[in-house]
Image: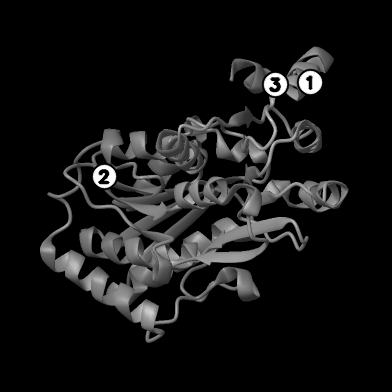
């Protein structure tokens, strides 16, 4: 595993090629690493669940820089890893280039659609889950101002923010939603110091609940919120435990299930697009002993009622990816 993490130089590449057993699955984590307590860590948990249930082994790699993406995919495929799963939209162009060269290898990508006959694309209705936590934010807020801090400024993350703002406005039409992005490069996913600064800035504008959708950067947002005596909302993984009594809830994006299912399918992985939303438990919100005192039964009932209406189509949550507008707020 250490060798995979390093993945530097020709010697490491040769060792990687030699070390992958035929048909062993493999996972490549995006920048930020598998212990980012968010997106990548959810993927890691899915791989671990598969390994524990089956007794199987898998290979893993943590990206160190953008230049490694194509090399990683090619070496794993050449070595016989199957399927090869990768987390993050940034693998899209590389996978579209590499997949045709390995028609007998199955690939799965999370957060991007790659139209190849040997690729499974898993995408999520993040806006639906974000709507629900937006409702909770509005119900918990005493100031009437809530915040959103995204990672890299891309349409996918604006999708989170817009769904959140719509949920906030559904509860309190007069609420003020402050939205910030951390940056415009991949470094925005792993900058907890900047996340903390943005959180403090939003508090200064009156925000008393802040939703972070920023990978490792969100760790800084949650820490700052706890330090400043306001509430935060985690993302992807259940982050309630990080600051018990301070994290209102977490918007669950079941990347763990996506990875687990891909590993479980193995070489029989079915190509095509798999959309994971509220209807199939692909997204949701976290309740546990760490936030039980923050979310009343009445609040939870209202959110669950809205979730049922989203599933039935009675409530339509705006998808920023569909037309790149955000009716409920301005970035």
Q: Residues within 10 Å of mark 3 (few under 14, many from 20)?
A: some
| Mark closer to the observer (3, 2) | 3
- 287 or 140: which is nearer to us? 287
- 157 or 65: which is nearer to us? 65
Could you say where residue 203 lies in the image, as x and y percent from the top left?
A: 35, 46
User: Which residue lies under the disc numbered 2?
Assistant: 230
Q: Quadrant of the C terminus?
A: bottom right
Left or right? Give the position of 125 relative to 281: right
Q: Quadrant of the N terminus?
A: top right
- 58 or 40: which is nearer to us? 58
Q: Which mark is residue 204?
A: none
Tell me if I can see residue 68 in this picture: yes
* Residue placed furthest toward the bottom: 314
Q: Which mark is residue 13?
A: 1
Left or right? Give the position of 81 relative to 285: right
Could you say where residue 249 lies in the image, as x and y percent from the top left?
A: 28, 51
Could you say where residue 209 lies in the image, as x and y percent from the top left?
A: 31, 52
Asked whether disc 2 touches disc 1, contact meaning CB atoms under 8 Å apart, the reply is no
User: Which residue lies under the disc numbered 3?
Assistant: 19
| Mark closer to the observer (3, 1) | 3
Q: Which residue sits at x=61%, y=29%?
A: 59
* Residue placed furthest toward the right: 101
Mark 3 secondary-structure assignment: helix
Q: Which residue sits at x=22%, y=59%?
A: 140
């Amino acid at each position: 595993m250490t060798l995979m993490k390093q993945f530097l130089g020709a010697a490491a590449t040769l060792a990687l090629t030699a070390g992958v057993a035929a048909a062993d699955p493999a996972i490549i984590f995006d920048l930020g690493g598998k212990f980012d307590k968010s997106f990548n860590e959810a993927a890691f948990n899915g791989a671990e669940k598969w390994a524990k249930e089956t007794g199987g082994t898998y290979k893993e790699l943590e990206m160190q820089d953008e230049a490694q993406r194509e090399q990683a995919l090619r070496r794993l495929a050449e070595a016989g890893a199957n399927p090869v799963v990768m987390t993050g939209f940034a693998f899209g162009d590389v996978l579209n280039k590499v997949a045709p060269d390995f028609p007998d290898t199955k690939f799965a990508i999370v957060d991007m659609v790659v139209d190849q006959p040997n690729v499974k694309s898993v995408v999520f209705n993040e806006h639906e889950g974000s709507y629900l936590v937006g409702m909770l934010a509005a119900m918990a807020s005493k100031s009437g101002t809530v915040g959103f801090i995204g990672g890299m400024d891309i349409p996918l993350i604006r999708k989170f923010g817009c769904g959140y703002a719509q949920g906030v406005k559904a509860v309190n039409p007069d609420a003020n939603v402050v939205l910030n992005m951390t940056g415009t490069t991949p470094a925005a996913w792993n900058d907890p110091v900047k996340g903390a600064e943005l959180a403090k800035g939003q508090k200064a504008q009156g925000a008393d609940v802040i939703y972070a959708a920023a990978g490792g950067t969100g760790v800084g947002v949650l820490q700052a919120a706890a330090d400043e005596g306001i509430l935060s909302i985690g993302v992807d993984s259940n982050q309630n435990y990080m600051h018990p009594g301070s994290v209102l809830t977490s918007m669950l994006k079941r990347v763990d299930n996506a990875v687990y299912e891909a590993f479980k399918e193995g070489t029989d992985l079915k190509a095509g697009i798999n959309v994971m939303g509220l209807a199939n438990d692909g997204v949701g919100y976290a309740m546990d002993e760490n936030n039980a005192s923050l979310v009343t039964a009445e609040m939870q009932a209202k959110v669950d009622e809205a979730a049922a209406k989203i599933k039935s189509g009675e409530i339509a949550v705006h998808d920023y990816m569909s037309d790149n507008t955000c009716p409920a707020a301005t970035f």
